[in-house]
Image (cartoon, rainbow, N blue to C red):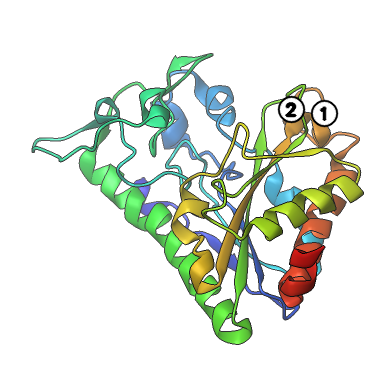
Amino acid sequence: MDSTLPAPLVIAPRNGVPVLLSIPHSGRDYPDWLLREARHGRRALQTLEDPLVDRLAWRALAAGFGAVIARTPRGVIDCNRSSDELDPASVVTDHNLPFAPLGPRARHGLGIIASRTHRHGPLWRAPLPIDRFERRLATVHTAYHDALDTELARLVKEHGTALLLDLHSMPPTHREPIVIGDRHGASAARWLADAAAQIATRSGFRAIRNDPYAGGYIVERHGRPATGIHALQVELDRSAYLARDLLSPGTGFDRASHLLLALAEGLAECLAAPTVIAAE
């Protein structure tokens, strides 16, 4: 079961620019054993996905940008959570595990192992044995972050700097359809986040900064502006690119794929001439 979970897909950059894509929540290959353990079947687990964001990034990937893409569903393990964001009720163990105090995401059922949703309630028929959690942690979560570390280090060695674009989607909102998260300036230089918002505006999308999503564990862990590694989280309203079922491509899909390409290319240009951009 858990030992057969696929490692993340790593796509090496081919365009010679220091921008790397991260796509942690688009895995949709649900093995039979996982569906048997789910109280409410596939549909409940699909609500955890960022649907089709990996496909939405096709233009950027075709243009040669590198990427790390999680192939397992978020319901298996969440690569955008730290290993201690774990609700003790979601695992079972015979020994005393030193659980950290519950943070707000784990408290609401969306820790590293999602345990419940507002719509469906508890997701699983039984808690996860701790040995299986540890296998998932090593096979999927640790492998994902190791791949990001390796690829970002490679870009810094080649270019002296790197930018991680962590791509997500959010439920439909009546506010701006794009949220740029830089953890309030902690995960990326502010001028890069400003530039991302400007690029979105030029592409016909309204953008807001850090509200309600300032950035999760991925940008928190990997964004180190003082060392030349910047990380931005990009949240796109699902209604901007999906059909009414919020699962299949909609009329805005191609436009949104152009947006992701514009962000990757535009921010790469910013990294190449930071003093000019910062002065504008």
- Is residue 144 shown to the viewer in this render? no
Image quadrant holding the C terminus, namely: bottom right
Residue position for label 1: 243
* Residue at horizontal 85 percent and vertical 34 percent from the top: 250
| Circle 2: element type | loop
- Residue 28 drawn above or below residue 226: above
The reply, left or right, for residue 4 in relation to residue 48 is: left
For badge 2, the amino acid type reads Leu
Considering every residue shown, the one lying at the far bottom of the view is 158
Please report the residue visible at 28 percent of the width from the left and 27 percent of the height from the top.
127
Residue 2 x %, y %: 36, 47
Residue 159 occupies quadrant: bottom right
Q: Secondary structure at mark 1?
A: loop
| Callout 1 crowding tier (Cα within 10 Å): few <14, some 14–19, many ≥20 | some
Q: Where is residue 51, by image quadrant? A: top right
Q: Amino acid at mark 1?
A: Ala
Circles 1 and 2: CB atoms closer than 8 Å:
yes
Q: Residue furthest left?
A: 95
- The spot of residue 94 in percent (x, y) is 9, 35
Which of 204/14 is in front? Answer: 204
Residue 16 x, y percent position in the rendering = 72, 81
Relative to 179, is 27 on the left or the right? Answer: left
Residue at 63%, 33% (x, y): give it. 211
Q: Which residue is mark 2?
A: 246
Q: Quadrant of residue 239?
A: top right
The N terminus lies in quadrant:
top left
Residue 213 or residue 83, whichever sits in front: 213
Most distant residue in the front direction: 279
